[in-house]
Image: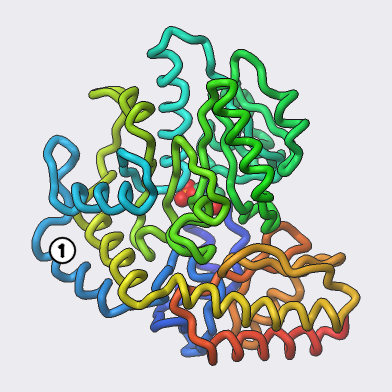
Amino acid sequence: MNIQEANQYLTPNYARFPLTLVKGQGARLWDDAGKSYLDFVAGIAVNTLGHAHPAMVKTITEQASTMLHCSNLYFNPQQNELAKKLTELSGLSKAFFCNSGAEANEAAIKLARKFFYDQGKNKHHIITATQSFHGRTMQTIAATGQDKVKEGFAPLPAGFKHVPLNDITALASAINDDTAAIMLEPLQGEGGVNLANIEYLEAVRALCDKQNILLIFDEIQTGIGRCGSMFAFEKAGVKPDILTLAKGLGGGVPIGAMLATDNVATSLSAGSHGTTFGGNPMSCAVALTVLDVIAKDDLLANVETRSEQLKAGLQKLVNTYDIFDEVKGDGLLLGLSANINVAPIVNQCLENGLLILMAGPKVLRFLPALNISESEIEEGLQILNKSIEGLNL
Ligand SMILES: *Cc1c(COP(=O)(O)O)cnc(C)c1O
C-alpha cells in the first residue's frame, strides 16, 4: 500500500514524513524501496539499544513462547523483578507499571492528589513549566505548558499552572495552600531541549520540602541513560518524590512506569488505580533486558563519550554558520538551536540518508541509540554538514 492509499485509512493527526520504514538493524533503518538511513531519532528516544538488538530478540522470542499477558489480578516474575530493579536504581521505593508516558504522568498526577486527599487536605493544584511536554491525554495536555496541544479540546481538566523554567521567583509566587505538586522535566525534550539548572532544581526541592509539596520529575524522555546517568536527576543530585518513565525503558516495546517514595505510594491503595496491560510479562522482560545491556555494555560511559563527539561536531556548525545559535542539552539528548525554521535541514538530511528531528520550529534534535558508535556519529555529522552546505543557508 502506498502513502496516498494509507492516508485513506489513517486519521490525519500526524504530519508524517513521506517515508515507509520496513526494517532496522543497529543504528540503521531501511525504507520500502531499500534505501538505508542512519537513525539519530531512535523512535523519539525509544530505541535505547538500536534496532533488532540480539538480546532483545532473544527475550521477546522466549517470553512470547512462555506467557505474554496474565493481567494484574495475579503476580508475574518479570514485573516483580523490574520493580525491584527500578527502585534500586532510582532510590525510590515502589513501582507502578503502565503502557506509555502519558499514562505514567496520569498516575503521578492522580497519586499526588490522592496523597493529600488521604490526609484530609485540599491540595490539588499542580505547577509545571512553560514549554513543558507531559503527554496527550486530557490531564497531561492540561499539564503541558504549550498552548498548541490544547487548542480545540476545552474544557480541560482544572488545577494546572505554568511558570517559566529556571525562574525560582516565578515558581515561589505561583505556590499557594492548594499546591500539591511541582512537575518538571530535568531537561525539556519536546519543548526545545531546555536544561533545568542544578541550582534551580535544588531550590525547587527546598521549596517543596518547606511547603509540603511533592516534586514530580517527568523523565519519560531523559530517563534510562539518555543523559549519561541512569536518570537525569542523579546529575543534579535532586531526588523527586515521584518519577515517571516510558520511552527508552522498553527499547521499543510499549511500557511506562511511575516510581514513588514509600510514604507517597501508600496512597495508591488497592482499587484506586490500574490498567489491564500495564506490567505485562513481555514488556517487563524486555525492559529488564534493556537495563541489563546498559549495565553490561557500559552504555552510560558511551553516552558521555559520544555526546562529547556529537557536541563538538555541532559546535563547529555554530562557529561556521550564522544561522545557528548554540548547542543545547545533555548526553544523547542534544539540540542545535537556530534563528531560522530548521525543517528544510531535517528534510535534506532525510534525503541524504540521516534521520533527525526537531524540538519546535527552530531547534534540531539528536537522539541516537545509547550504543551508537564513534564512526556512526562521525557519519551522521558528515551527512548533516553536507545537507546544510547543499541548502545554501
Ligand atoms: C513523550 C513524552 C511524554 C508522553 O509520552 P507518550 O508515551 O507519548 O504518552 C511525556 N513526557 C515527556 C517528557 C515526553 O517526552
Residue at 26% in and 47% down? 83
Judge whether residue 11 can be spotted in this image. Answer: no
Q: Which residue does the numbered mark 1 point to in the structure image?
A: 63
Q: Residue furthest top?
A: 120
Total number of numbered labels?
Answer: 1
Q: Nearer the viewer, residue 78 or 73?
A: 78
Q: Nearer the viewer, residue 208 or 63?
A: 208
The image shows residue 188, relative to residue 243, as above or below, that is below
Q: Quadrant of residue 318?
A: bottom right
Q: Residue furthest left?
A: 66
Q: Nearer the viewer, residue 237 or 61?
A: 237
In-image side of 262 versus 201 (left or right): left
Residue 367: x, y in percent? 56, 69
Residue at 49% in and 39% down? 240
Judge whether residue 62 can be spotted in this image. Answer: yes
Residue at 84% in and 68% down? 325
Give the secondary structure at mark 1: helix
In the picture, the quarter occupied by the C terminus is bottom right
Residue 330: x, y in percent? 61, 64
Residue 223: x, y in percent? 47, 56
Residue 189: x, y in percent? 61, 56
Amino acid found under the numbered disc labelled 1 = Gln
In-image side of 87 versus 217 (left or right): left
Residue at 32% in and 32% down? 262
In the picture, the quarter occupied by the N terminus is bottom left
In-image side of 264 versus 223 (left or right): left
